[in-house]
């Protein structure tokens, strides 16, 4: 019997939810295989066509029409089955856009001996899981990350459908205690009894094995002329929520105290032009550099290169845009770097304030500058916080440990 994960977001498409769901599926599948081997359960072999058949996980993932080649290449490398379908149609003349997703899910559930459904992301996955319970009696769990859930609540009809779906759910999974509070508030609003439903926090994990603190950064220091420079780094999509604009606004205060400081921004997004405008208005072209997208292979070099990672995320109430957790803080911690994050959303769960980094008022360039200067001027404090962050990331946010505990709780 297998678990079906239905998701609108999945690798190779880049994004935090995409990576979270992939690692959830991969580690769940690997853990089940290990348990089966220990129990002397025979592992399935490749079939006549060389297609991998092992695994306790089936993924029904949304397919992006422009990305089919990359999706196919990616899927073939995995040791669990991934089925791609258009779960949410992009054409305006098809209403509702998710109309076929329950049919796809039903076909898979009937043919693959599914025992449980994970509605891992997107409204199409929610409605599909609901349909499978009504038609086949399969239990399902709803996963929530923050912005995804708040956005769905903006329209009256979606709110009513969500309430219907949540009432039938067997449990809820949040990427932080903050997102669990969003679920609780929604259920209270619609008088949904949570006493008989499981409520679980599954934090994003990290892979400590891949993190190397001994990478040679000389080529980057030469390329960007960084001799005797202090390096601030931000990594993420260039959107308003991330707060990179406030770091830029803090730079004049930082440079006044420490003129040998540079700020690197890794990532792309619609907010880039606005950020570039702020840089130009403040005459910071020599101190702030936009590096664009950086490959997964190259990113560790920048983590090693920097002195501090910053992402002062804020809650944009009008759009329901919020940071559900902030895995980037753990990634920087893995490389022994202290972090600065906005005191909003789920970020206080990613950063131990005063121990692995600092929480700041995300709307205050002055607060951001003060904490950055404090860390840049104190080598011992940077080292102490970086080491504490790495120890916490390795010991508490290891994917295998997280999934092992999570799977045990789901199946209890």
Image: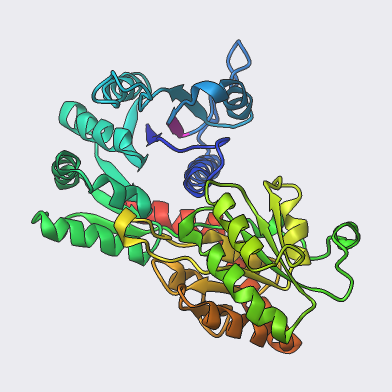
Q: Residue at x 51, y 32 (%)?
A: 55
Q: Is the stretch drawn in magenta largely helix, strand or loop?
A: strand
**Residue 329 seen from this side:** yes
Q: Looking at this view, is 198 or 318 the one in front?
A: 318
Q: Looking at this view, is 340 or 335 the one in front?
A: 340
Q: Residue at x 68, y 48 (%)?
A: 292
Q: Which image quarter: residue 138?
A: top left
Q: Relative to residue 94, is residue 82 depicted above or below?
A: below
Of the 4 image quadrants, the one containing the N terminus is top left
Q: Position of residue 349 (x, y in %)?
A: 44, 71
Where are the magenta residues, as a range? 56-60
**Residue 411 seen from this side:** no
Q: Which image quarter: residue 357?
A: bottom right
Q: Residue at x 12, y 58 (%)?
A: 189
Q: Which image quarter: residue 190?
A: bottom left
Q: Looking at this view, is 93 or 271 the one in front?
A: 271
Q: Relative to residue 43, is residue 186 depicted above or below?
A: below
Q: Position of residue 362 (x, y in %)?
A: 47, 73
Of the 4 image quadrants, the one containing the C terminus is bottom left
Colour convention: rainbow
């Amino acid at each position: 019997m297998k678990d079906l994960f239905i998701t609108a977001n999945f690798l190779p498409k880049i994004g935090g939810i995409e990576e979270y769901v992939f690692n959830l599926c991969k580690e769940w599948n690997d853990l089940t295989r290990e348990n089966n081997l220990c129990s002397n359960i025979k592992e399935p072999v490749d079939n006549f066509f060389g297609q991998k058949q092992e695994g306790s996980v089936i993924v029904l993932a949304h397919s992006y029409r422009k990305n089919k080649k990359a999706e196919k290449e990616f899927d073939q490398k995995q040791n669990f089955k991934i089925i791609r379908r258009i779960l949410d149609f992009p054409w305006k003349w098809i209403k509702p856009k998710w109309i076929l997703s329950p049919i796809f899910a039903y076909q898979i559930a009937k043919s693959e001996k599914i025992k449980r459904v994970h509605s891992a992301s997107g409204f199409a996955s929610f409605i599909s899981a609901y349909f499978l319970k009504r038609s086949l009696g399969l239990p399902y769990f709803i996963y929530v990350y923050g912005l995804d859930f708040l956005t769905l609540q903006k329209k009256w009809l979606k709110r009513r459908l969500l309430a219907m779906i949540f009432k039938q759910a067997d449990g809820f999974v949040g990427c932080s205690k903050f997102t669990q509070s969003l679920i609780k508030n929604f259920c209270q609003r619609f008088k949904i009894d949570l006493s008989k439903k499981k409520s679980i926090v599954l934090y994003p994990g990290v892979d400590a094995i891949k993190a190397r603190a001994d990478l040679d950064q000389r080529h980057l220091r030469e390329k960007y002329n960084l001799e005797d420079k202090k390096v601030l780094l931000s990594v993420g999509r260039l959107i308003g929520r991330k707060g990179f604009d406030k770091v830029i606004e803090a730079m004049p205060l930082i440079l006044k105290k420490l003129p040998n400081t540079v700020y690197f921004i890794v990532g792309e997004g619609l907010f880039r032009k606005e950020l570039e405008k702020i840089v130009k208005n403040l005459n910071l072209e020599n101190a702030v550099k936009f590096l664009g997208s950086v490959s997964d292979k190259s990113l560790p070099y920048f983590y090693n290169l920097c002195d501090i990672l910053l992402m002062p995320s804020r809650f944009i109430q009008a759009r329901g845009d919020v940071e559900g957790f902030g895995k980037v803080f753990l990634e920087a911690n893995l490389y022994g770097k202290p972090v600065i994050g906005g005191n909003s959303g789920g970020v206080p769960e990613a950063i131990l304030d005063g121990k692995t980094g600092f929480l700041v008022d995300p709307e205050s360039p002055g607060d951001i500058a003060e904490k950055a200067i404090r860390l840049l001027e104190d080598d011992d404090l940077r080292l102490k916080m970086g080491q504490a962050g790495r120890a916490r990331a390795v010991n508490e946010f290891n994917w295998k440990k997280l999934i092992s505990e999570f799977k045990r709780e789901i199946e209890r």
